[in-house]
Amino acid sequence: MIDQSLLDAVKSYSANMTRPISFVLGSGEHSKRAELIDFLTKIAGTTDKIHFDAQANDDSLPSPISFKVISHIDGALTDTGIVFSGIPGGHEFTSLILAILQAGGHTLKLDEGIQKLIKRFNKPLQFQTYVSLSCHSCPEVVQALNQFALLNDDISNEMIDGALFQEQVDANNIQGVPAVFLNGKPFANGLIDTAKLIEKLQEQFPDLLAEADDAEQLEQQDVTIIGAGPAGVAAAIYTARKGLKVTMVADRIGGQVKDTQDIENLISVPLTTGGELSANFETHLREYNITLKEHVSVKEISETADENYRIHLNTGETFETRSIILATGAQWRKLGVAGEEENIGKGVAFCAHCDGPFFKGKDIAVVGGGNSGIEAALDLAGIVKHVTV
């Protein structure tokens, strides 16, 4: 289930932990329980900063193959609100590692404005995130909600491997991942990222996320770039190289490129992935004095009396800029027909790789006959009963 190279990586990463953590397992019997115990035992065996006792169970956890992450803060055991139901392998192994590191005191990867916003919640928010271990877009959602839980004691997040909890998947009519439920009700489906989670929270709880008086304000910028795909990243680097004060505002670095699996047509790079290329974008950006405002969005742009612009962010922050470059890029194309929005994640999907297994043995339609449409149809042909393009 977990090879030595991954265990060596856990041991190496644990050097960044400033306090211990513990895994606590749910009680009961399950066919996968022994495998989960072996998985957690091997991880805990890599360092004395990770504790696990298979006999110490918590009856309040949702299943025999659920476990929670406990942080040791100043000698006291503190519930982080992070729960994994299933064995977080595949793409979700990264989510587990980040949960371990961040519960162990490592710096969170969220913008300071977002962190302050999340800390202001004063009502219980219980998230459940259904995933597939082969879904490459699910970990970002799990990792964001885990960080929300670490920031606020009223927030919790449970990652649920849909393959091991088929009854719940059927009962909730889940036909696409990630599928996020909040306090037992559907909250978000399909193509979700941290910025969209914040946006939906602001829609649902406008009073809780009102602008804060303590929001820090940036000094006036020469250039503000909205969007962080290839064009936005290039614009930021070139303007910073000219000695200008540059801020980049984006929901995520990489933009839609981040969703691409294999990239084989980037000159001088025979093969890379969207995730790797996006990580390289961020590395390159951080070589320059560029202010990065990731996972946030622009609510409003207004003109100032001296003919500059004022940027209003959804975190409550505002700042002035002399110029703006819009690099908002492309988005998934929707049909705009009745029933489309309501059924995203319930039969309407955008990612054949992530959601294809949910349609096994069914007749499906792929709308679009370009490269992406035909590629999706070919991927699905080996899974579903019949594909109509």
Image (cartoon, grey):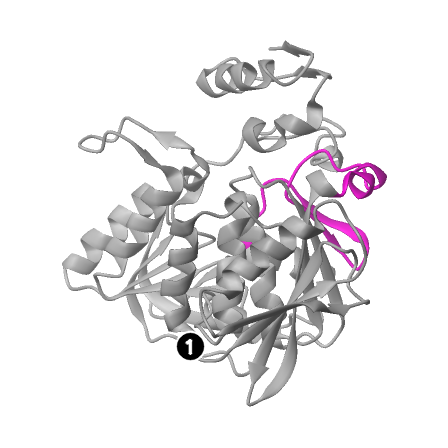
Q: Position of residue 273 (x, y in %)?
A: 36, 37
Image position, residue 377 (x, y; %): 56, 15
Quarter of the image where the C terminus is located:
top right
Given residues 6 and 156, the one toward you in this image is 6
Q: Where in the figure is residue 216, as x and y percent of width and height?
A: 45, 79
Q: Which residue position holds label 1?
A: 217
Looking at the rendering, the stretch of residues picked out in magenta corresponds to: 165-194
**251 is higher (above) or lower (below) than 117:** above
- Can you see residue 336? no
- Name the image quarter holding residue 128: bottom right
The N terminus sits in image quarter: top right
Using the image, determine if residue 208 lies above or below residue 66. Answer: below
199 and 377: which one is in front? 377
Q: Position of residue 155 (x, y in %)?
A: 69, 69
Query: Looking at this rendering, what residue extends furthest in the right direction?
Result: 171
User: Residue at the spot x=51%, y=45% of the render?
Assistant: 91
- Residue in the image at 42% along x and 44% along y: 255
Q: Is residue 61 visible?
A: yes
Q: Amino acid at mark 1?
A: Gln
